[in-house]
Image (cartoon, rainbow, N blue to C red):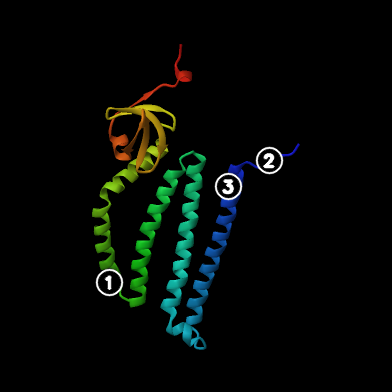
Amino acid sequence: MKIQNTPHSKDSAKTTHATLIAIIVMLLCLIVVIATIELAKLSGFSFITDHRNVIVSIEFTVFVMTLVEVIGRTIVASFRRRGIEPVGQSIRTIIRGAVYIVLTVTIISTLLSNPALAISLGAVMGVIFGFATQNLISNVVSGMILAIVRPVQIGDEITVTGSTGNVKEIALIYTVLDTTGRLYYVPSIVMFTNVVMKNKKPEEIIP
């Protein structure tokens, strides 16, 4: 009997291969960073000694970016298995943004050899980022909790804030309700803080 590979199994295999390659790249980067630091201590490698901070910053950047991609792929694959891949993709995007901001500040501090500058830049960027994304962060946190608890699923008929429809999509920051001729994008914070009425499916009704 011949067993055919399903698209899901093929995607899982591709994800596994990509993750293994990324892990190998991470290990190589880590080895190169350690080697660079050790070579900079030797007198015969003046170029590496003079440009150690720049070289290590480049190597560390590659390491961190690869690590973020590994974590992101793992998160997306986890949510894909649960049927809510868009939530995983949104979480991966947020992690990327946060890590890249911290990475930028760290590299600037390393190149300038000024820790005080890194602290100042980090504080300023943190305040700006916090004020600019406070509503987004509230939606993201609510969406993550809803993704874990899963009070509603795709196909459920629900009523929230007076709107009734079938759940068409569950993203990290909103839930899409399909009503007659209209689509409602309900923010996750609204789904989290309001009463949601869920109609039972026919098979769930006990006669």
Q: Which mark is residue 81?
A: none
Q: Which residue is mark 1?
A: 117
User: In the image, what residue occupies the spot 44% across and 30% down?
Assistant: 155
Q: Nearer the viewer, mark 3 or mark 1?
A: 3
Whether label 1 touches label 2, CB < 8 Å: no
Which quarter of the figure has residue 165?
top left
Q: Which mark is residue 4?
A: 2
Residue 117 vs 50, above or below: the answer is above
Q: Which sits earlier in the primary sequence, circle 1 or circle 2?
A: 2
Q: Which residue is mark 3?
A: 11
Which quarter of the figure has residue 121?
bottom left
Q: Residue 75: x, y in percent? A: 47, 48
Mark 1, residues whose alpha carbon is within 10 Å: few (<14), some, or many (≥20)? Answer: some
User: In the image, what residue occupies the spot 57% across and 62% down?
Assistant: 24
Residue 70 vs 50, above or below: the answer is above
User: Mark 2 falls on what kind of element?
Assistant: loop
Task: Name which residue type carries label 1.
Answer: Leu
Which quarter of the figure has residue 148?
top left
Q: Residue 15: x, y in percent? A: 56, 51
On the picture, is 97 further left or further right than 194?
A: right
Residue 5 vs 177, above or below: the answer is below
Q: Residue 112: x, y in percent? A: 33, 77
Task: Name which residue type carries label 2.
Answer: Gln
Residue projecting furthest to the top: 207
Q: Which quadrant of the rendered structure holds the N terminus? A: top right
User: Mark 3 falls on what kind of element?
Assistant: helix
Mark 3, residues whose alpha carbon is within 10 Å: few (<14), some, or many (≥20)? Answer: few
Question: Disc 3 and disc 2: Cα gap in Å?
Answer: 14 Å
Question: Disc 3 and disc 1: Cα gap in Å?
Answer: 44 Å
